[in-house]
Image (spheres, rainbow, N blue to C red):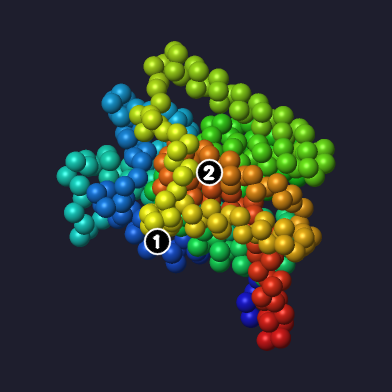
Amino acid sequence: MYITIMNYLYKKKKIPILFTLFVMVCFYAYRDFLITYRMMLLDEYFLYYHYQNIIIYYETGDLKYSDNLPMNVRFLGLILQYIIFKVVPCINLTNISVNPNYDELFVCATFSLALLNYLSKYLLIILFFYYVVKILKRPLIEGSICIFLSFILINYVEDFTFDRITILYTLLILMSLNNKYLSCILITLSFLVSEKVIMIIGPFLLIKYIFLKEKKYLINLKFAILSVGLYGLMIYLLINFFNFSFSPLYENTGFDRLFLDLSNKSHISNSIIPITFCFIPYAIYLFDKNKRNLNFSVYEILLPIIMIFLGTGGGEHNIGRYAMYSFIIWLPLFASQINHYLKISKLIEDE
């Protein structure tokens, strides 16, 4: 029954079906949003970075809320959050003791951030299924495995900031690579989303061009370099002419944070386990030497490694979270390996 339904959806017009699925999932999973919203207001228990302050700055112009680099130049998430803040009526939760330091603006900015994260999560998962099945041309069962594992792996990235929308934007670039003009535009504008987008896409394109000899990606790689330059120029101008500065959170950070303590439960759960997940599919490939008709290079293992080093600025408790930004790259391979070794397709056919 499941495969019949998925085949039906796959053959029909894609955008209306995907949109309908998105609306249905969001409708039925609304409690996910409410839980996220509630947890964000219980700040003393669930610490996270307050993008809400930047929204208050947009609304009031009060410079004390303007915040620091690089958080206040992640413009796509901030603009989308501000649009929700202005357009969608704010819902106040009942039966919750909101921090007395949070005024009405902060609560409503929290509502907009929670809603943005909620929508980004389910849009990411639905588009990822489309990417795997339609663009990578994988079997429906492998797309389904990707959906199942995405619900698990997405829990390793931050629920309350811009992680989900950053991964979603990275996925949109991957989906657009067959369209030269659209992909170049998205890659160029990635410096306005997050530095993490280009840290994934830049090396990914370089690997495609150098190791897989795919010359068509040279133009994309050039625009990735352009985006890096634009990001550097933006930071330079903001620091030297607009009195922007980097967050004190990045002071005294160093590579010593890469030395994880196996006796520290937080290091194990937040770093070692998610990092291990990133390496498993490539380790399996090195063992069986089977690409499963996927166009990838084992050098893609460098992507989570790069993110691990980037994560040193966020602390040893965050490097696993940073590495997990790469899951949209390696999960199709892992799903294919799972399908092969567990013979899931055969089990379904036998049914």
In the figure, is residue 247 to the left or right of 143? Answer: left
All told, the count of numbered labels is: 2
One can see residue 321 in this view: no
In the foreground, 202 or 2:
202
Residue at the far left: name it: 100
Q: Residue at x 75, y 42 (%)?
A: 208
Q: Secondary structure at mark 1?
A: helix
Q: Position of residue 255 (x, y in %)?
A: 48, 36
Circle 1 Cα neighbour tier, 10 Å, few/some/many (<14 / 14–19 / ≥20): some
Tell me: 298 left or right of 91. Answer: right
Residue drawn at x 27%, y 48% as measured from the top left: 43
Which numbered circle lies on residue 308?
2
Label 2 to label 1, Cα distance in Å?
28 Å
- Please state which of residues 297 and 120 is positioned toward the viewer in this rendering: 297
User: What residue sits 61% from the left and 67% below the top?
Assistant: 145
Measured as percent of width and height from the top left, residue 338 is found at 65, 69
Q: Vertical placement of 160 versus 244: above or below?
A: below
Residue 178, visible in the rendered structure? yes
Look at mark 1 in the image and give the residue it sits on. Answer: 32
The x, y position of residue 306, in whole percent, is 58, 41
Quadrant of the image for the C terminus?
A: bottom right
Query: At numbered mark 2, what does the secondary structure look like: helix, strand or loop?
Result: helix
Residue sitting at 58 percent across and 54 percent down? 278
What amino acid is found at the position of numbered circle 1 in the picture? Asp
> Residue flagged by tag 2: what amino acid is it?
Ile
Picture coordinates of residue 96 (x, y %)? 21, 57
Q: Which mark is residue 232?
A: none
Indicate which label's residue lies in the foreground, 2 or 1.
2
